[in-house]
Amino acid sequence: MSASAPALARQPRRTVGLRLRDPAVALTFLSLIFALLLALFPTSFPRFVVEAWQNGRAIPVMILFTVAVNLGIYIRVAQRRSARPGMLAPALLGAVPAFVVAGLKFWLQAAIAHTLSGDVPNVLARVNEEILTQLYFAFIGAVFVPFVLIIFAQQFRDRHS
Amino acid sequence: MLPLHSYAANWTAVKWLLWIGLYLILGFLAPWLMTRAWAHHHRSDLRPGFRQLFQNGELGLIGLILAISVIWDLQRSQYTPFTVALGSVFLTVTAIMAGQIWIESYCRRSTNSDFQPERGWRDSRTMLLLVASQALVIEMLLDRFAKVTAQ
């Protein structure tokens, strides 16, 4: 083997390093689409979301959608930075949204129970608005929280390696 | 001719757009115009673009301030404490992340440790857009909820 062979040997690719701006761009677009749907279809879009929640379809669809969005962002970042996808990050991106959305489901049920127990006018419309708002927050959290956790884990790893 | 209450309803529907426009004009456009005015007054050749003016991640600070006002609006709303808490926590996390861009740029610049103006501008702009889009949706939802509670 010649002396230059080690230099020519293929360097192992580093794993993907995520930054906050990676999910931020996708989340901005998704929020703007949500705002646009709310502005263009002020009655039918909220009714569609509330009916999906009442039929029990909202939670599984939201989990599948957010996992797909998270993994899509991750793969795109890996391709753009020519980095090797790791094992832990995709696992977190797949698992954390399920926990976040499932946890927030109980939070929303508590909010609905709180509204129904109060002596307030127009209670059903209030419940519908609570559902719409909390599902939006759950959606944001399911995309953003896993990335925040991974970025903190990366900083922790870098400090201790 | 439309009756007066119809104009009032239309005004209510777009007020969140004007509200966010105010933040962008006062936080983004006004500082840029002020540098132009300063240069004109002092007969200077200084002509910074948005990129140069906000290269230290100052847009992250604008995002933080924008988020504070939305959190305040959420706290004053008649949503249940569960919804108010959830929205406030998510907005706070996003706002801290936006502010962190500004802080990181400041620390890197002060310690001469790999400070990249281009990165400060790009990251803070992205985080400001994220905060602004979330603020827009939350203000629209608050507007809807206020109409429901007023009925």
Image: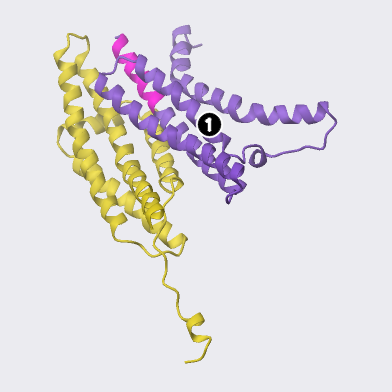
Q: Which shade is chain A?
A: yellow
Q: Position of residue A127 (x, y in %)?
A: 21, 21
At 36% across and 44% down in the image, what residue appears? A148
At 44% across and 23% down in the image, what residue appears? B68
Q: Position of residue B112 (x, y in %)?
A: 61, 48
**What's under tag 1, amino acid-wise?**
Leu
Q: Secondary structure at mark 1?
A: helix
For label 1, the residue is B61
User: Is residue B142 part of the magenta span, yes or no?
Assistant: yes
Q: Position of residue A106 (x, y in %)?
A: 17, 31
* Chain under callout 1: B
Quick check: B20 above or below A63?
above
User: Which range is magenta?
Assistant: B138-150
Q: Quadrant of residue B122?
A: top right
Quick check: A158 above or below A36?
below
Quick check: A111 above or below A83?
above
Instruction: Examine the residues drawn in magenta and state their main secondary structure.
Output: helix
Q: Is residue B63 left or right of residue A35?
A: right
Quarter of the figure that contains the C terminus of chain A: bottom left
Q: Which shade is chain B?
A: purple
At 32% across and 54% down in the image, what residue appears? A71
Judging depth in this view, the residue of A124 and B82 nearest the camera is: B82
Q: Quadrant of residue A107?
A: top left
Q: Position of residue B65 (x, y in %)?
A: 50, 26
Q: Is residue B87 left or right of residue B109?
A: left
At 28% across and 47% down in the image, what residue appears? A65
Quick check: A159 above or below B44?
below
User: Is residue B31 part of the magenta span, yes or no?
Assistant: no
